[in-house]
Image: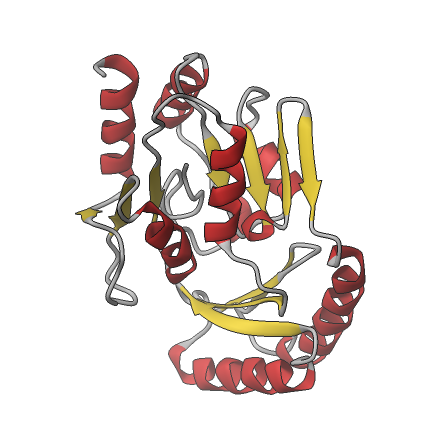
Amino acid sequence: MLDYDGTLAPIVSDPARARLDREMLAVLKQLAARDDLMVAVISGRALADLKRKVRLDSIYYAGCHGMEMEGPGWSYVHPKMEMISVKICHLENYLRGILGRVRGSIIENKRYALTVHYRKVAARDRRKVEEVARQAEKSFSKWLKMEPGRMSFEYKPTVNWNKGKSVEILLRLHRANNPYPIYIGDDLTDESAFKRMLHKGLGILVNNNERPYQTSAVIRIRSVRHVRQFLQYLAYTV
């Protein structure tokens, strides 16, 4: 089970330009073709966007941290998500009305979640972005909560949900004998999944220097390139 941005694809200044390289796509195809493995990509991106990025039919996808999921012959949408999508549109309009004047800010509507990216914002303007983001959190706190990410602020529904719950659903779907789950991610939003791996699998954190923090992952690796090398080892050696 893998995050997308910062794990399968490098972090870039414009999230729309994040791409899998050929070698990463090839190893994912190889892993997906094995009968003894389940491959899943779990991301904060919208499900449709995530599927366009990866383009493999035989794996599982969990968009918006798993609030919308699909796999071979199966799908799931959290029951409160249609109402949330309306609130996300209201939040988007509110933020664009203010941050539209802040050069470099990017507002990404994921239908059931929303992210404000400030990687391209000048250092002198980043405090303003944070102030606006926190004020928006107060205004929409009945429906949405904000979490800081890698040069971003992400708004998610106030339902009791996270990537860890998505992992539990996917593990129940995969009924192999004595499964050994592996989760690889790079951000604070992956911590709930790492906690699910404790005592039952392996959590791997892709290190970054933007936001050092304590982690429940038991292994740290350096980069997307090292993720690819690890997956190649699984695909061609194990």
Which quarter of the rendering shows the N terminus? top left
Q: Quadrant of residue 182?
A: top left
User: Do we see residue 186 in this rendering?
Assistant: no
Q: Residue furthest front?
A: 177
Q: Residue drawn at (74%, 63%), measured in percent from left and top?
A: 84
Numbered-mark total? 0
Could you say where residue 122 lies in the image, as x and y percent from the top left? 43, 75
Q: Quadrant of residue 200?
A: top left
Q: Say left or right for 61 vs 68.
A: left
Note whether 23 is above or below 169 in the view shown: above
Residue 57 in sight here: yes
Q: Is residue 146 left or right of residue 74?
A: left
Give whichever of 123, 230 is nearer the camera: 230
Q: Is 198 above or below relative to 132?
A: above
- Say above or below: 95 vs 134: above
Q: How is the image coloured?
A: secondary structure
The quadrant of the rendering that contains the C terminus is: top left
**Residue at image location 68% in from the left, 22% down from the top:** 73
Relative image position of residue 81 (x, y in whole percent): 74, 56
Residue at horizontal 47%, vertical 43%?
167
User: 129 or 182, which is in the foreground?
Assistant: 182
Give the residue drawn at x 75%, y 59%.
80
**Image coordinates for residue 31, horizontal then vertical, percent:** 39, 19
Q: Is residue 164 left or right of residue 63?
A: left
**Whole-percent x and y of residue 64?**
59, 52
